[in-house]
Image: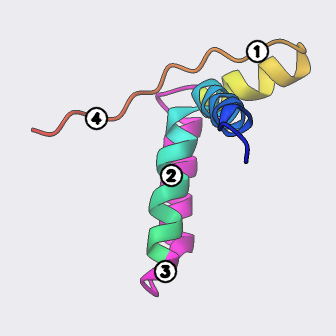
Amino acid sequence: MEDGTALRERVAAFAATLASRSLLTQRATKEIVTALGAGGDADTLTLQWMREAGGPSGDMHEGIAAFHERRPPSFTWTAPRPS
């Protein structure tokens, strides 16, 4: 049996990939998938998140610019704090 090294390496690589992605995209994906699983209207939620991505956070524009400039993106969106 393997000592778990390969699994730890794969988990670390996956975690690094997630950490490099937009938090806004991760949050939106979770909410949209949850809505679909509950039989909800994912289209409305998708549009809400698209407005957020293209709006104040600037993450969508940053992602597109980074892609065109062949550089890693620098995402800035953070989840709103509960009141």
**Residue positioned 51% across, 38% down in the render:** 24
Label 2 and label 1: CA atoms lie apart by: 21 Å
- Dot 2 corresponds to which residue? 28
Question: Nearer the observer, disc 1 or disc 4?
Answer: 1
**56 and 35: which is toward the camera:** 35
Residue range highlighted in magenta: 36-58
Give whichever of discs 3 and 2 has the lower sequence position: 2
C-beta proximity under 8 Å, tags 2 and 4: no
Label 1 and label 4: CA atoms lie apart by: 24 Å
| In the image, farthest residue toward the left | 83
Q: Residues within 10 Å of mark 2 (few under 14, many from 20)?
A: some
Q: What amino acid is labelled 1 in the image? A: Pro
**Residue positioned 57% across, 72% down in the render:** 43
Q: Quadrant of the C terminus?
A: top left
Q: What amino acid is labelled 2 in the image? A: Ala
C-beta proximity under 8 Å, tags 3 and 2: no
Rendered image quadrant of residue 6 = top right
Question: Nearer the observer, disc 3 or disc 2?
Answer: 3
- Dot 4 corresponds to which residue? 80
| In the image, farthest residue toward the front | 1
Disc on res. 15? none
Q: Position of 66 compared to 25: left or right?
A: right
Q: Relative to 3, does residue 28 appear above or below in the rendering?
A: below
Label 3 and label 2: CA atoms lie apart by: 14 Å
Q: Position of 40 compared to 9: left or right?
A: left
Label 3 and label 4: CA atoms lie apart by: 24 Å
Label 1 and label 3: CA atoms lie apart by: 32 Å
Disc on res. 37? 3
Give whichever of discs 1 and 3 has the lower sequence position: 3
- Dot 1 corresponds to which residue? 72
